[in-house]
Amino acid sequence: MSSLTARAAEWQKSCGCMLTFHRAAPAAKWADLPNKGFYLNLDYLDNLLGTLKRDGWEIVTADEIVCRLKLGENGSRLVNFSVDDCYRDTFEHVVPLFRRHGVPVTLFVTTGIPDGTMPLGWAGLEAILAERPQITYNGQTVEVSTHQAKQQWFARISSAWETHDFYDEFAKFCQVNGVDPLELRDEHAITWEMLETFKGDPLVEIGAHTVSHYRISSLPEDQALQELAGSRQRLRARLGIDCRHFAFPYGRSGDCGKRDFDLAREAGFVSASTTRKGLVRQGQDLFSLPRNTLNGVHQSMAYASFLLSGLAGLAARVLGRV
Ligand SMILES: [Zn+2]
């Protein structure tokens, strides 16, 4: 990974690369997940952290990237890892792994998850499919006893829900399948007590990721500001921290724009991140930082190298996928 990415990063005069993912699972469990793309295999993440450290990359907080960008650094081999949303696996698996490597991780918390105000949605659908041999869907009993069937039905149902009121659909699905959504949420959500254990740990940086995980560009301005500022206030009230960094849900160009970047500044954040691919470079606007998503379907050192080199950002711009 070293020679190509070092040359490319220097060539692009970058001040680092921001990587993000949602969830992680132990290798044995990962293989059976209905929604693998949403998870990283912990063995892969372990290997990636070890490889980056050996290759001389400096794994840092979002705060460090922003500070070094302001200082005008060029050609730095800085990498930041962030976890969006934050479920129980962040507490059980992800933070312990980063601590074991002695490197920091940024948690962008959706405060409706520990507050219990946000239904699980896709994570809940996935949990139900993972645990059951059969489900009821659209009035029919469906066999989901094989890994392949679980994955196919996850893809099918989640895409059908995209065009409806998502949380309503999930509530109805729980009801016909005899699932208590509150019990399910308690099994999978991160709690404030778990988040409190990270307070004061220099290896855990806590940022905000809205209250309810809405697509910010789709909201009227006052509601959008409330999603941003409300999550910051909630993290201060519960954890006593002054949250400096924010990440936009979904984060692609249709999900957050100029108005929303201004709202992040107004809400008191120092930076806001998107999921537009690319490296952080001099002159970069701090409220639309690029971040590269690590997807469970593309787990390879070669793909990580592609992201770190900045070539992924270049390819996305060429293909118009921003
Ligand atoms: Zn998210």
Image: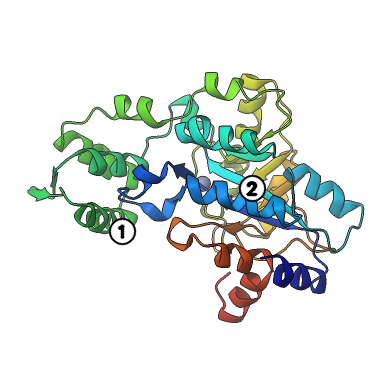
* Image side of residue 12 versus residue 210, left or right: right
- Viewer-closest of 284 and 254: 284
Of the residues under marks 1 and 2, which one precedes in the sequence?
Answer: 2
Residue 273 in view: yes
* Image side of residue 185 versus residue 107, left or right: left
Locate residue 4: give its quadrant: bottom right
Q: Which residue is mark 2?
A: 81
Residue 178 x %, y %:
16, 31
Residue at disc 1, CB closer than 8 Å to ligand 1: no
Q: Secondary structure at mark 2?
A: strand
Whether pointer 1 and pointer 2 mark residues with C-beta atoms closer than 8 Å, the reply is no
In this view, 51 is above or below 311: above
- Mark 2 nearby-residue class (10 Å; few <14, some 14–19, many ≥20): many
The amino acid sitting under disc 2 is Phe
Residue 249 in view: no
Labels 1, 2: front one: 2
Q: Which residue is mark 1?
A: 159
Picture disc at residue 90: none
Residue 1 x %, y %:
66, 65
> Could you tell me how far apart the alpha carbons at marks 1 and 2 are, in whole angstroms?
28 Å
Q: Residue furthest front?
A: 54
Residue 34 x %, y %:
30, 50
In this view, 307 is above or below 171: below
Q: Secondary structure at mark 1?
A: helix
The amino acid sitting under disc 1 is Ser
In this view, 230 is above or below 281: above
Measuring 21% from the left and 31% from the top, which residue is drawn there?
A: 179
Measuring 70% from the left and 46% from the top, which residue is drawn there?
A: 264
* Image side of residue 35 versus residue 299, left or right: left
- Viewer-closest of 149 and 240: 149
Q: Residue furthest right?
A: 71
